[in-house]
Image: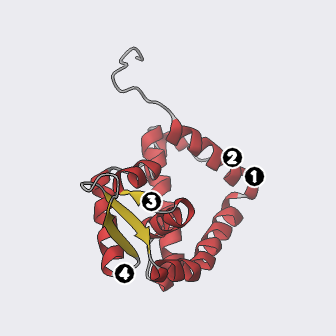
Amino acid sequence: MVDFDAIVPCNCSALRQAARHVTRLYDSELAPAGLGLNQYSILSRLEKLGPRTIQALAANLVMDRSTLGHLLRPLLKRGLLKLDASKQDRRSRVIHLTAAGKSLLKQARPLWAKAERRFEHRIGTVPAHALREALARVAAADFDLADRSFT
């Protein structure tokens, strides 16, 4: 029997270790398309949501704006995304998925689906679904950092 408390000392460490491990799986499957999981996620989200300001996309991806900016640069350079000034506020920038981005996403989608199948094969379909539900609750949780009443 494995003593998980000895291996993973806290919730945060467990989440980070699992995220790194699973990201490697998806990165390896997406490599033939020349994408990493973070890049695929950005393209996929923009396809689903349509053009978004950088701030709105960062919030939707639960990512800080500077990290998103760092991830956007290579996608912009490759012509997969286009950045325009917002019509409502010229100081804001709006990210658009280009035709090249849509084409690459179409090529990458089966690779991503293979990673999904590999994950579910190892973890199990029911536990994988339960994990996604639990992680969605974690991502949506309001951890009021100012509330120090918990000890």
Secondary structure of the residue carrying tag 4 is loop
Q: Which residue is mark 1?
A: 126
Give the distance between the C-alpha atoms of the residues marked 4 and 3, in whole angstroms: 28 Å
- First in sequence, mark 4 or 3: give its number: 3
Residue lying farthest right? 126
Q: How is the image coloured?
A: secondary structure
Q: Nearer the viewer, mark 4 or mark 3?
A: 4
- First in sequence, mark 1 or 4: give its number: 4
Residue drawn at point x = 49 percent, y = 64 percent: 46
Q: Nearer the viewer, mark 1 or mark 4?
A: 4
Secondary structure of the residue carrying tag 3 is helix
Give the distance between the C-alpha atoms of the residues marked 1 and 4, in whole angstroms: 39 Å
Residue contact between numbered discs 2 and 1, judged by CB atoms under 8 Å: yes
Q: Which mark is residue 130?
A: 2
Badge 4, how many Cα within 10 Å: few under 14, some, many 20+?
Answer: some
Query: Position of 84 compared to 128: left or right?
Result: left
Q: Which mark is residue 79?
A: 4
